[in-house]
Amino acid sequence: MRRPRVPAGVRRALTFWRRSVQARVVASTLVLSAVVITAVGWFLLQQTRDGLLSNRVDAVVSEASGETNEAELRLEATLRTEVDITRQVQDLARPIISRGETRGFRVVLAGPVDAEVPLANADFSTGLDLEASIPSSLEERLATVGSNPAWTYTSIVTRGAEGEGSPASVPGIVVGSQIRLPADGNTYALYLLFPLDEQAETLSLVTQALLTAAVLLLVLVAGITWLVTRQVVTPVRMARQVAERLAAGRLQERLRVTGEDDLARLAMSFNQMATNLQRQIRQLEELSRVQRRFVSDVSHELRTPLTTVRMAGDVLHDARGDFDPVTSRAAELLQHELDRFETLLGDLLEISRFDAGAAQLDLEDVNLGDVVRRVVDSTRPLAEQRGVRIAIADGTQPCLAEADVRRVERIVRNLVTNAIDHADPDHDPGIVITLGSSATASAVAVRDYGVGLQPGESAMVFNRFWRADPARARTSGGTGLGLAIAVEDTHLHGGWLQAWGRPGEGAQFRLTLPRRTSLTLRRSPLSLEPTDAPAAPGREPVR
């Protein structure tokens, strides 16, 4: 399934987030500060709200108690001969309603509480919606004669004039108490409804102030965090830039030291480290140059005595038939070792040219199949001597590359002779050579079925004079520099030379060259892991 494409802006933002310590520190500080400010703000708002409501409740309960006491005093002063219940209810309610209009509360006088009297018949402030404004829980509590005064929160709903606007609702507190009416001797409920609009407005102002302060505080925290982290991150970024320049070979780069704080001491330590590294690198470069010069000079100087010894050895080798058996064998061994010494000397000269950067390519269009066949023909006697059979797979298709044919042939010969040294004579065929090509690359893979390679040896096999088994003799007369020269030749072409191997399953070396030297290799047409190798658990073949 194809993954959805991430927009370029999102990718840049994610890259900036991953790479910028300053951005992550500022963002995390803002998030933590926002959490803390939100928690503190919520706590302050709750405390403010509880304080406002508590004070308002105390005030309205006290005021309601005062109104109830005053109403009871007026009822006591009423003549006992008054029997008009409606008139007495109105005389009781109207003064309270009049005071409520000037002091901002609503009044409801309903009852009797111990009789089934509709609430609509009560006397109450104009425009008040009784059913919506008086909670049923408070009505039920005051329905029992003798209940103590009670209060609760409610929503005071008022209706506009008929056909004019929708009902308005404001939060409020309703306080209920019982009053006995002399006209009929029944108990009535007196409800006083006090709006909380002033407290709501105060709480809104406090909330806005807290939000404004929180935003300003977050901006201030972000600015302070950015400045503080900048003071720390800027020297680190400068150190990173200088380290990148040092890695690029500009060994004279140094950090600027200002002040005497920890960052300045870090810069001084970094500069001291860079100076030591520069001195050691120059010493190593000088030592390497001396070693390369020594190898080159010795190799050249050995040419003359080797030529003289070679001439004497050829004379002795040609006349070995006239010698006794021991002397004749000594002449043959001398000739063999002279051949090997001459090969070693040539390899040392080639290595010195690589080290000096003097190696050059003589490019032409090369068919790797022809090169492989020539190498197989030239190494067949050695393979037959070891009892190893060589097979070429897919050798009919052209496998072209722009390369130096001499160097490519030397690479393939080194791979084949190395495979002959390590092949299993009992396996048929002992060596399999596979060719492959694509639009951008051509490849040759040499597979043997010998002892294989231990984990980690596939990278070491190209080191100079390295052998997987030091006790194993070089039956092909190798010098230990063949694969090292081969990998240098491959790099000179811009190609890959890679090795695969497992203990007891043999090894495979893959040479990959670009079809044109101007191309950059991205993929090889042949797999590095052989197709006939058992798959390792949980791993895919290496391309």
Image (cartoon, rainbow, N blue to C red):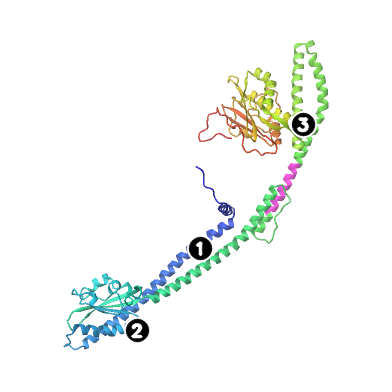
Query: Would residue 182 be seen by someone viewing this image from the given angle?
Result: no
Q: Main secondary structure of the magenta part?
A: helix
On-image quarter of the C terminus: top right
Give the alpha-carbon distance from disc 2 to disc 3, as whole Å.
Answer: 115 Å
Which is more foreground, mark 2 or mark 3?
A: 2
Callout 2: 10 Å neighbours few (<14), some, many (20+)?
few
Q: Is residue 374 left or right of residue 29?
A: right
The magenta-colored residue range is: 269-285
Give residue 410's quadrant in the image.
Answer: top right
Which is more foreground, mark 2 or mark 1?
A: 2
Give the alpha-carbon distance from disc 2 to disc 1, as whole Å.
Answer: 47 Å
Give the alpha-carbon distance from disc 3 to disc 1, as whole Å.
Answer: 69 Å
- Residue at disc 3, secondary structure: helix
Q: Which residue is mark 3?
A: 349
Marker disc for residue 102:
2
Marker disc for residue 33:
1
Residue type at numbered disc 3: Leu
Q: Nearer the viewer, residue 92 or 175?
A: 92
Query: Would residue 38 be seen by someone viewing this image from the given angle?
Result: yes
Residue type at numbered disc 2: Thr
Q: Nearer the viewer, residue 348 or 274?
A: 348
Give residue 22's quadrant in the image.
Answer: bottom right
Q: Is residue 505 left or right of residue 300?
A: left
Residue at 82%, 19% in the rendered image = 312
